[in-house]
Image: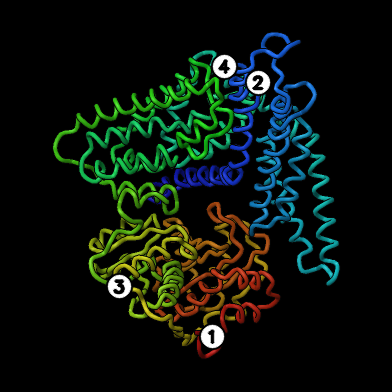
Amino acid sequence: MATVAQTPAPRTSVRVRVQKFGTFLSNMVLPNIGAFIAWGLITALVIQTGWITLIGDKVFGYAPGLEPGQYDYGFISSLGGWDGVHDGIVGPMIRFLLPILIGYTGGRMAYGGDNIRGGVVGAIATMGAVTGADVPMFLGAMVMGPLGGWSMRKWDSVWEHKIRPGFEMLVNNFSAGIWGMLLAVLGYAVAGPFVEQFSKGAGHAVNFLVDHNLMPLASIFVEPAKVLFLNNAINHGVFTPLGINEAADKGHSLLFLVEANPGPGLGLLLAFTLFGKGAAKASAPGAILIQFIGGIHEIYFPYVLMKPKLIAAVILGGMTGVATNQLLDTGLRSPASPGSIIAVWLAAPASSFVGVTLSVILAAAVSFAVASFLLKLEKGDDEGDLVGATASMEAMKGKKSSVSGALVGSGTREHEGPIHAIVFACDAGMGSSAMGASVLRRKIRDAGFSDVKVENKAISNLADSYDLVVTHQDLTDRARQRTGSAIHVSVDNFMGSPRYDEIVDLLHRTNGAGGDAVAVAEDDEGAGEMLAEESIVLRGRATTRDEAITEAGRLLVESGAVDPSYVDAMHEREKSVSTHMGNGLAIPHGTNEAKPAIRHSAISFVRYPDGLDWNGKETKFVVGVAGAGKDHLALLGRIAQVFVDRDRVAELEAAESAADVRRILGGVGSTSAPA
């Protein structure tokens, strides 16, 4: 049974990891889309086959003394770099500016905390790769930029808090300069040539698919990947770098439209507009504007999730669009992001404008025809569950969708009457739900809703008496079975979920405007005995998640709070739902069935200065929890408040003694909690 229960976990983990990887790639590219658009507009206007050149040819004809097909438009030709004298703007932008921007962004992200220091080192490292190859170094930038930021952060941690006052600027500047120099040399000698060969090899593979008319088959994988939110990894990790290389060589690339073509989604939504039923039919026209004009393709994903057979419509539509561009040898000069028809037209060179437009129209037509046929085959009044499909989409995405309100009315469904009872539910009801309840309770009280009660429970103890239930996204279905009449909100980060703000907004709609914020002190009775100094370790020895759980559990055993069997229950609990809370914190605890093994409530605290991997999330603090009753909840509440405050977390990272940790966690050992 244990083997069977664990089987789905790796599949989920792989999908989430790919999503995170794709998100990281897209977060390097998307902030710089404005630069890509600028470059694309310049190339579309002033290269030899650009709009201005073509119009100029019609107006002015051939320039005297030049061969047929050659023009001399002075300033325009110098901008494009095709006058034989100037480099122009087009070449240097794609060779230097765009990769370095990506490298800077990636370095800044990898360093963490939005620190420009990592961005600077990432840009220096990227420059080495850029000058070490003769192709646009976008793949190199996506490697060297994050490598520069991440490695600089690791080096900085070596001498953190060890620099003598007055020497900080000197050490910081020279360390960044020296390390950036070494990475630039590495990029020039290794990364540049390697990526150049990889790009050429990948280009040959793409050419093989094009030459053998196989490129449309890519849609078989791309369209389902979009619905699963794996599109960023494919689009920004593969198609964008290869497409830019191809566009620099031949003036355009169809790779930019394999994923971004708005035609398949348009056809699907048109079919629902004409032949759909219920909420899907009513919401489809508005979704068309968001998808086709706004370029937000995820608006149509719930329609596919609601009726999975319709994936055939978008696959065939996508294949049609790719085949059209391949047949007509058309494409875009730069990425179209977001995937709006406006962005597509702006990125299309003059020679490809008609072909690109036709690829969108034909893709929409095929998708519409197939989706309409499949919808007409349905019998009865089954209109599908669009709300449920939207929730599934958000669960796969891992966060609130910015456009889901257009489908279901609002991010959280409307509630009839005021909300007075909110419960956080988890497997055991003693750890993660207690932390999340504390964070939300403070937000609600700060908003002035002092009459709203927020508590936490184990799912097995839930009754259908709550107005709103908050659970981890993997537990929502179980909670619905016990509290069917409540509003259900799914989260993936108990410490800082954006859904908490939505709940506060919902209270404003259902309970009125709220009142003045009040400060409420939480009960601290017995908290001083729960986190003993002997249960605080400032440099843990574990290197993996399971070792960290054992280390935190062993401290609870040594304190006399639990029996040794409780540690096994902590590992068993982790198999069902992760106890990672976000913000570098994990709070492993036993299952609900293991409570008899708890002698008295206690908490252990282990810090890992170098961090460790917890299901793909970096973790520096592990708090082991054993709660016999509710006397540990006040302490968990204060810990939650600490970990939503970056300054307090930084103090914990710098703490030099167990007493410092107890003080930072909010006066543990005092007789009253802070307001």
Image point 21% across, 40% down: which residue? Answer: 277
Q: Place residue 202 in its image quadrant.
A: top right
Q: Which residue is mark 2?
A: 48
Amino acid identity at mark 3: Asn
Disc number lying in front (2 or 4): 2
Mark 1 or mark 3: which comes first in sequence? 3
In the picture, residue 463 is in which quadrant?
bottom left
Q: Considering depth in this image, is 457 or 405 the residue closer to the camera?
A: 405
Dot 1 or dot 2, earlier in sequence = 2
Q: Nearer the viewer, mark 1 or mark 4?
A: 4
Q: Is residue 478 left or right of residue 224?
A: left
Position of residue 5 measured from the top left corner of the image (x, y, whole percent): 39, 50
Residue topped by disc 4: 208
Q: Residues within 10 Å of mark 1 (few under 14, many from 20)?
A: some
Q: Residues within 10 Å of mark 2 (few under 14, many from 20)?
A: many
Left or right of 144: which side holds 229?
left
For discs 1 and 2, the disc positioned in front in the rendered view: 2
